[in-house]
Image: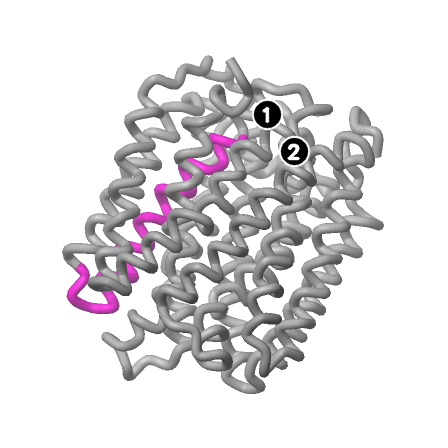
Amino acid sequence: MSLAAELAPLALGIFAIGTNLFIVVPLLPAIRRDFPAVAAGDLGQLLVSAYALPYALLAPALGPLSDRLGRVRVMVVGLTLLGLAAAISASAAPSLAVLAAARGIAGIGAALFTPAAYALVGDRYPYAQRQQAMAVVLAGLPMATVVGVPAAGLLAAASSWRWGLGAVAVLAALSLLFMMHLDAPIPAPTGGHWSLIWASLRDRRAMLAVAVSFLWFVAGLGLFTYMGQYLFSLFGFGSGERALAVGAYGVMGLIASLAGARFAAVAGKRAAVVIGLSGLCGVFLLVAVNRRSGAVALLTLAAWGAASWFGMPSQQAIVSELRPAARGTMLALNNSAMYLGATLGAAVIGKALDWGGFRAAGGLAAGIVTTAALIAGLMVRVPTVDRD
């Protein structure tokens, strides 16, 4: 069986989660029309935070479950919660509070599924080639921006933003069908639930790698939350055009994810991470300075996708090997840090946007991601089995 076929159930689940995560970007202007009293920055912050904050807060506590109960069981529960939450968002969200609550339930589902899926990859594939397997699974995220988010955006343009959110429920149901046929051994318990968490938190090397992921998402997803507003307010892109622009981001992300994994096999995982983060710095500076050219804005989104995903498979592979006996716990902490970063980023960069426009927001994001690149290049020690 090919690598892609073997990992397809995991990639499909990540695709559903990624669609639900990024769907706010093209839908934000349409959602705001139903809630005109809320500022764009505040609305974006609320919808992203409602999804990301439960993930960030609960993932560390949920992570040891896959280490102790098995990866597949935990993934099935996570996808079930995601599908239910998406259905509530589409059919039973008469108010912003109900919509935010449904996003929170979806965040809990993602907190269960995603670290367990990455841990399963770590269980099955040797570290030297693991970034290639991670790239296949992670491809579900940029694929979500290529197919899932644009389709939802076009559906919303033809009808309502609620239909776009409802499409996520269908994706989750399809993912569950494939997941039911996936088999994996239950890991032997290596410690108590909370001891797995505290031992990981006390590991300085592990926490430095987690800090890179945190800053990566503060800058990247924090600014990405407002890209729909960026394309609409500065360049007049309509709903369908915004969805297609996000698709360009995803196409380049998909290509870069696979290319970055191959690059890491030759030059090392650390190099792939640093190059990707450095590219993001340049992209964010372009966001800060470009206020006139829609064509440049499209190229910026494409370059953003490439830089974002070039090093991500290597980053996840590095984290997966830092504490192999508590792999699910470690990856849960890492993903918690990323979503906490997304929550903080949406708030901080949203305030920068309200204060100084995209010039201030892009400049702040560039500074944050530069810090992440310096930590990754100078302070993080990758596992010794890698050539780094």
Magenta range: 93-118
The C terminus - image quarter: top right
The image quarter containing residue 156 is bottom left
Q: Amino acid at mark 2?
A: Ala
Local SS, label 2: helix
279 or 223: nearer the viewer: 279
Q: Is residue 195 visible?
A: no
Q: Residue at x 30, y 47 (%)?
A: 168
Q: Residue 237 placed where, x, y %?
A: 43, 73
378 or 223: nearer the viewer: 223
Q: Which residue is mark 2?
A: 317
Check contact, mark 2 vs mark 1: CB within 8 A: yes
Report if residue 364 lies within the magenta region.
Answer: no
Q: Residue 72 placed where, x, y %?
A: 40, 23
Horizontally, residue 244 falls left or right of residue 284, namely left
Q: Residue 133 placed where, x, y %?
A: 59, 27
* Crowd around label 2: few <14 · some 14–19 · many ≥20 (10 Å): many
Q: Identify the coloring.
A: one colour
Q: Is residue 188 above or below residue 248?
A: above
